Structure formats: C-alpha cells, structure tokens
Image: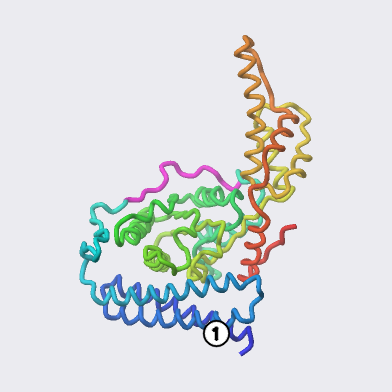
Amino acid sequence: MNYDEKMNAYLKMLQEATGMDEAAGSAARAGKTEEAAVKYRKAAALYATSAEYLLELMENADASDQAEYQQSIDRLIAVSAQMKELAAAVATRKGKPENTSAKGGDAKIPQEYDEEEQARFEPAAEAPQTGFGEIVGLNEAKQIVTDEIINPLIYEDVYHKFKRGNRGGLLLFGPPGGGKTMMARAIAAESHMAFFPVRCSDIVGRYFGEAEKRVRALFQAAREATNAVIFMDEAEALACRRGGNSTVMNRLVPELLSQMDGFERFSGHIIVIFATNRPYDLDPAFLRPGRLATHCYIALPDYEIRLALLKKQILSRPCEEGINIEAFARATERFSCADLVNMVEKGCLLPINREILARKQGNPEANEKLTEADLKTALKRVHPSVEMEEIHRLEKWMKQMGIAFKPAA
C-alpha cells in the first residue's frame, strides 16, 4: 500500500477502536459486565493494531514529524493496555468497588463516593449580558455561530422546513486571549439560554467514579433547565486523547461522549461549547459530526479589529484629544485582544498615579487624563503573549482537518 492507503487504513482502524471503546463503556454503565469485558478486549486489540499501522506510517514521515508520530504510537499502546485492565476489572466487579489495600502497605484505593455527596450544578447566577454587539470584530466567527447554533434555535420552523437542524456542539479554538470565553457568553445571551460555565476542577474529584457522576449531574442539570449552554473552557483538560496513565480521563471521555450523544432524545435545546488553545490534544471522537460539528477559529485580531478594540478601550476612559490610535493599532501586530486591553490598562496606571500624587500634595481638584505618551510607555512594557510557533501548530492542525483559514504572516 502507498502512504495514502496506509493512512486511510490507520484512520479506519482507529475509528473502529474508539467506537468499540465507547460501546464497551456503554455496556459497562448498563451493568452488562460480560459484554463490556468482551468489547474492552476487542478495543484493546484494535488500538494495538492502530499503533502498528502508525508505526509503518512513521517510517515514511518527515523527520520533523517523527516525534509526534512516536508520541501517538506510545499513546495508542498505553490505551490498549488500559482497555485490557478495564476488561479484567469489569469482568470481576460487582456493585461498587471495595476499599482494599495493596501489598507492601500502599495507600488504600478510595471508595466510590456516596450519591448524596454528588455535586450539584446550577446555571450562572446572572445571565450573560454580553451580546454579539459587544464583541469587536470576529464577524466571520459570529456568522458561523449564528448560522449553525443560534438561528436553528430561534427559527426552528424555517430550518425544519429545509430539513436542517442544530448539528451538534461547537468548538471554539485559537490562541489564548482571543475572546473565546466572551464568544461563549454572547451565544448564551443571544439565544436566551441558561449558562453553565464548567472548569476541570468542577468535574474531576478524588474518588473512583466521581468524575463520571459529576458529568452526568451536569448534563442532568442542563436538561432540567430545558434550554442551556454548557461551556467547558480549556477543554483539553477534560476531553484529552485517551491513553497514558490517567485512568480517570480514560473513563471520563466515554462518559462525556455518551452524554453528548443523548441530545436527540431530549425535547429541549442544549448547546455544548468547548474552548481550547490546543484542539490537537482533544480526543478525535469529539470532533466527528453530531458532537462538536461546528469548528470556529478565533484568530489573533487583524489591524481593523485592533483599531476598533483600542478605540473602544481608550475612548471609554478619560483621555486627551488627538491620540493617534491608528499608530498603536499598527504597532501591536500579533497582540491578542487580552494583550491590547493589558496595554491600555498599564497605560492608565500612569495618570492614576499622577492624580493620586497631586491629591497627596494638596490638590483635590486634580483631573489627570490618559495621554499618548502614557500609551507609548505602556507599549514598551508589554509584548505579544502568543508565540508564532503556537499559531503555526494550530494552522497545521486546521490543514489536517480541512478547515479553511488565512495563514498568519
């Protein structure tokens, strides 16, 4: 087989492996232990075969990609071993795991936590107030989100007429500080839905099985809200590729997938939004149609967006007239939105300190303003927080996924 044929064979085998893995997890949760054990063993064999296929592909890969191939191979071997362990564990497990201690005085394995202690999830106390009108730029991203996520909820009858519905969740990805969290909050505001912001620490606990139960509790709370947005920031921490030594993550990913697959049987509307700076670290099973079907790149701001954002940030504060904002927009190439806000805030410290000093010296009427000189001083003190290497890695991933993008300069 040539390289393309080998790659297709590898991807097909990996898809079979993840499918069998998910089926095993579903059987285990349903209490079908014998069926789950058989499926876990099959998944182990499929993951091992996938590793063999990838090893053959690595022989013809560029030298610069060798390390990445090897990392993937190691991950597949590790997850294959994990599947074998799960097969053995589920075949012998009856009810809750017992609190036992290993030979040699090792620490006891914590018991599964009580149902009464299960975490409760509630939507944010205050509904998000930030709509699309408050977000500077990102017009293409707003249009994608409107077409794929918001309009199918608001104009459901029109989409139903054309046999087109909400096709699943949303993946917001891009370099840090680009506005992914603000975009998620705007989606909740625009669609008038309850907003459930979730962090890794909200899900991962210290007891066996706790993370999976917290995921179920989260999605149950969203269903009770009828219409809800579940927002998982830094999603790679919760939905990372299965493998390695983290048994928690290897159980958590199938549970997340199972919950996301249950929406078609639900009468309300739930939007799951993942935000990440590292989409290439997500488990591939999340990226298939029906799950995170819509992929939206939140890139670094271009000149027009930087200009609009700087105008908004500077002119909303006491400032002198005639500041050359265009010059600052040109001088801040590769700055993220967060970097731009940080620059203006650092600049504001200078007039703040001048006014405080004047008051201490007996001038309560002092009325300092932000000046162009203050901003120039601040610009010398801040630098872009995003490395071009990080941008190029994102672009490489988008190319592999067939996602259109404008390459960074």
Residue 292 on image: x %, y %: 51, 65
- Direction bottom: furthest residue: 1
Of residues 302 and 241, the one drawn nearer to the viewer in this rendering:
241
Q: Is residue 102 left or right of residue 229?
A: left
Q: Is residue 208 above or below residue 337?
A: below
Of residues 228 and 281, the one drawn nearer to the viewer in this rendering:
281
Q: Give the magenta range.
A: 120-133
Residue 81 is inside the magenta segment? no
Q: Main secondary structure of the magenta part?
A: loop
Picture quadrant of residue 28:
bottom left
Q: Is residue 370 left or right of residue 123?
A: right
Residue drawn at x 23%, y 75% as measured from the top left: 92
Residue 371 on image: x %, y %: 73, 28
Q: Is residue 264 visible?
A: no
Of residues 104 and 352, the one drawn nearer to the viewer in this rendering:
104
Q: Which residue is mark 1?
A: 9
Q: Amino acid at mark 1?
A: Ala
Image quadrant in which the N terminus is located: bottom right
Of residues 70 and 339, the one drawn nearer to the viewer in this rendering:
70
Q: Is residue 360 visible?
A: yes
Element at label 1: helix
Residue 66 on image: x %, y %: 61, 73
Residue 127 is inside the magenta segment? yes
